[in-house]
Amino acid sequence: MANPSLLILAGDGIGPEVMAEVKRIIAWYGAKRGLTFDVSEDLVGGCAYDAHGTPLHDDTMAKAQLVDAVLLGAVGGPKYDGLDFSVKPERGLLRLRKEMDLFANLRPAQCFDALADFSSLKREIVAGLDIMIVRELTSGVYFGEPRGIFDDNEGGRVGINTQRYTTNEIRRVARSAFELARKRNNRVCSMEKANVMESGILWREEVTWVHVNEYPDVQLSHMYADNGAMQLVRNPKQFDVIVTDNLFGDLLSDAAAMLTGSLGMLPSASLGVPMANGRPKAMYEPVHGSAPDITGKGLANPIACILSFAMALRYSFDMGDEATRVETAIETVLANGARTADLMGPDGGTPISTTGMGDAILAALDASL
Ligand code: IPM
Ligand code: MG
């Protein structure tokens, strides 16, 4: 059988720095576990704009469609703030999500015990937290038409975006959430604003339809997304799987990130429909951004990006044991006190560098053999 293939798009800012540590883990798998990936690399975001005048070259898009999984670092930076909207770094990322049809975005928020005191919330609220946010990623207000900035014919302008969801779009992401719940604690909470939005009413009805007809064994509840935001910081452990739309998912997952101690800890998987080889179209990326303020200083935490690779092992390559190996290695180094700058707790300490964290994780992987 052919080696599993990966396309690495490290992107901008700290993207290349954290991805460098993932490449070391990939090399470790080749050397120590006889697991060789065919790895290619390309540009996305601002660096692609610098090279080609577009945040995602068509050739890169075509490559992404052919590999088993894309690993993405981060896109964007102040240098690109002035660019026209159509060529902003984020457009590259959004094009990948849309054209690969990666409709289910899995954002687990897990609080490692060693970090429970680092959250802005009290230890007892977050210790042991393990929730999964499933964010719809290819539709909603991010992509709905009409959109744009127009003259309002009264001497002013009007900015328009459209929240739009179809039956099929809602049902397929709901199925992803129910499937995940069956492998976890069997509970799904669906979040929308059915009190003010028709698209929210449809969302609630279609999620309920999937529940009644296909997953009656899973517990389903509904919550307005604003209440959901409050409940996430009030009592996050009440949730198992949360399923929500593209924009609410963007907001709720950033809030959930802070429960875990640092945005530098959160991985994500974006999954689409199965390809001919049975593997889903897939892209894996940390939830954090390009962090221009710390770029090039060796301060970035590579854990979110490494955990994203672990998700690739689990969801693209069906290697749950190997994913657990990587996750356990990370748990171990955190328990042993390894901390990047973002993980400086209440009592300070000396942070290690991005590479230092990579070293520690590799040593823990060696010890796991
Ligand atoms: C995310 C990010 C992106 C989004 C940006 C970079 C376009 O915030 O993945 O959460 O809004 O989806
Ligand atoms: Mg976001």
Image (tube, rainbow, N blue to C red):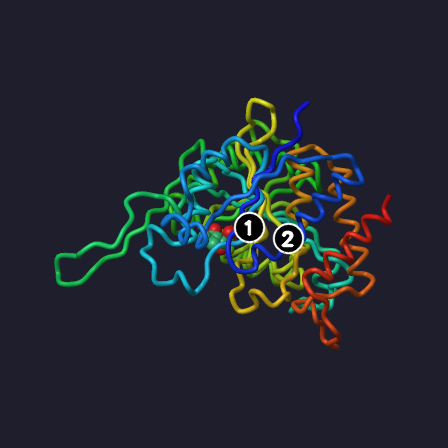
Residue shown at 48%/41% (left/top)? 204
Disc ID at residue 10:
1
Question: On screen, 83 above or below 108?
Answer: below
Q: Say left or right for 205 vs 368.
A: left
Q: Are marks 1 and 2 in contact (CB under 8 Å)?
A: yes
Between 180 and 54, which is closer to the camera in this rendering?
A: 54
Q: Residues within 10 Å of mark 1 (few under 14, many from 20)?
A: many
Query: Spatial distance from mark 1 to mark 2, Cα to Cα?
Result: 9 Å
Q: Amino acid at mark 1?
A: Ala
Q: Point out residue 299 in the picture as x, y percentages from the top left corner.
A: 64, 66
Q: Point out residue 270 in the picture as x, y percentages from the top left corner.
A: 55, 41
The quadrant of the picture occupied by the N terminus is top right
Q: Which residue is mark 2?
A: 20
Q: Point out residue 113 in the picture as x, y percentages from the top left corner.
A: 77, 60
Q: How many marks?
A: 2
Residue shown at 40%/38% (left/top)? 58
Between 359 and 240, which is closer to the camera in this rendering?
A: 359
Q: Amino acid at mark 2?
A: Ala
